[in-house]
Amino acid sequence: MTSPALPGPPRPTSRDVARAAGVSQATVSLVLGEKWRGRVSETTAARVRDTARGLGYRPNLAARNLRLGRTRTALLVVPALTNEFFARVYTGAAAVAAEHGFGVVLYPSPDGTGPARDPFPSARAALDGVIASSMAADALDALHGANVPLVMLDSDPSAPGPAARVNLDIADGMRQVARHLLALGHRRFLHLASAVDTWTFTARAGALHTALREVPGTEVRTASAALDVRAGREAAEHALTLPGPRPTAVVCDDDILAAGACKAARRLGLRVPDDLSVTGFDDLALATAVEPELTTVQLPAEQVGERGMAALLAVLAGRQAQPGSLPVRLVVRGSSAPPPGLPTA
């Protein structure tokens, strides 16, 4: 017969910490709740932390959260998770959240960009804050009136509303693409644009067309398509067969559309990059799965998630979120080269 296990020593309580540190329980709560600044000296705060660490004290987060009326939960609203970029955003947000005792609930908008059903019966009771991609902004309609802090990702910096924003330098990414192709000698372009009406794609189009207009003799066609390979192929195939001189470079709003453009080129008997250069945007795994590999703009997706969660934590603590946009960079691969008739480098 197995003897019952003996109970271990009781877990130390905040009262034990207060007694050992020679302070009140209220002081322990202030220090361990990171609310001591301006109310408790740094020396006392250090003594309380050292005492708690020495006793092996661990706060009862569930009880503390009930007292504070918080669940230490953030909602991350993104388009459908078939897009690798947003899975990486979640990874970054969850890592920072875990460091601060928070959880992240991932909520994809059902159709990728449209309205979503309220994920919680009462968002105010269930959430401490929301982090949302501008591509799924309509899904936030269900949370209107919930009065929870909102951090927007990749959204119009001139629009009112969120407590903080985390943006990528999208415009600079498109300028890098334009400079690269212009330096190769391209002057006839097709812009294969996303049909999704959001700030990020508007910013890409604006930056591209502005950069190309600065160089005399450039021509730009625009075709739009839904964000899938088939739609990209059909739109590119149609645009490349219109009357007039054919574009020598296709600038795509993302890598998925670029994969469609590459398929269109093959169907038309064109070689990439000998007859037609193709560029993407995002640097998804797809960019190195196609042949030739895509020249594309690399976006630091995990850093977007990290910065978004850090911004929400700052807002909850009454601090200013870190300003500035995250830099992006062009990765040149095999899908871009000088246009036909010009020597290769």
Image (cartoon, rainbow, N blue to C red):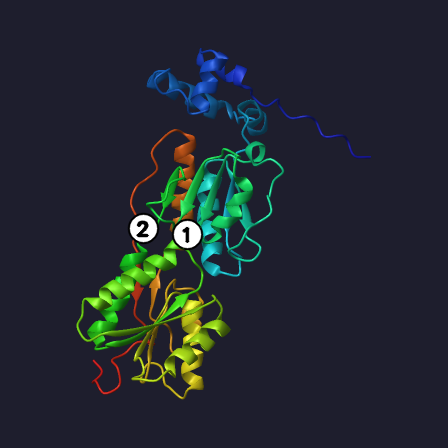
Q: Secondary structure at mark 2?
A: loop
Q: Secondary structure at mark 1?
A: helix
Give the left or right position of residue 172, taking residue 255 as reference.
Answer: left
Question: Nearer the N terminus, badge 2 or badge 1?
Answer: 1
| Residue topped by disc 2 | 326
| Residue topped by disc 1 | 302
Give the left or right position of residue 213, taking residue 261 as reference.
Answer: left
Task: Tell me the amino acid under the disc marked 1.
Answer: Glu
Where 159 falls versus 125 (above or below)?
below
Q: Which quarter shows the N terminus?
A: top right
The crowd level at tag 2 (other Cα within 10 Å; few <14, some 14-19, many 20+) is: some
| Residue 179 place in picture, x, y as percent | 22, 68
Q: Depth check: give the residue in front, 97 or 252.
A: 252
Q: Depth check: give the residue in front, 138 or 186.
A: 138
Where 104 falls versus 329 (above or below)?
above
Q: Quadrant of residue 188?
A: bottom left
Residue located at (41% from left, 77% from top): 236
| Residue 210 place in picture, x, y as percent | 24, 63
Residue located at (43% from left, 21% from top): 31
Where 164 falls versus 61 (above or below)?
below
Q: Which quarter shows the C terminus?
A: bottom left
Q: Is residue 291 at least partly visible in the picture?
A: no
| Residue 331 place in picture, x, y as percent | 31, 66
- The single residue placed furthest to the left in the displayed view is 216
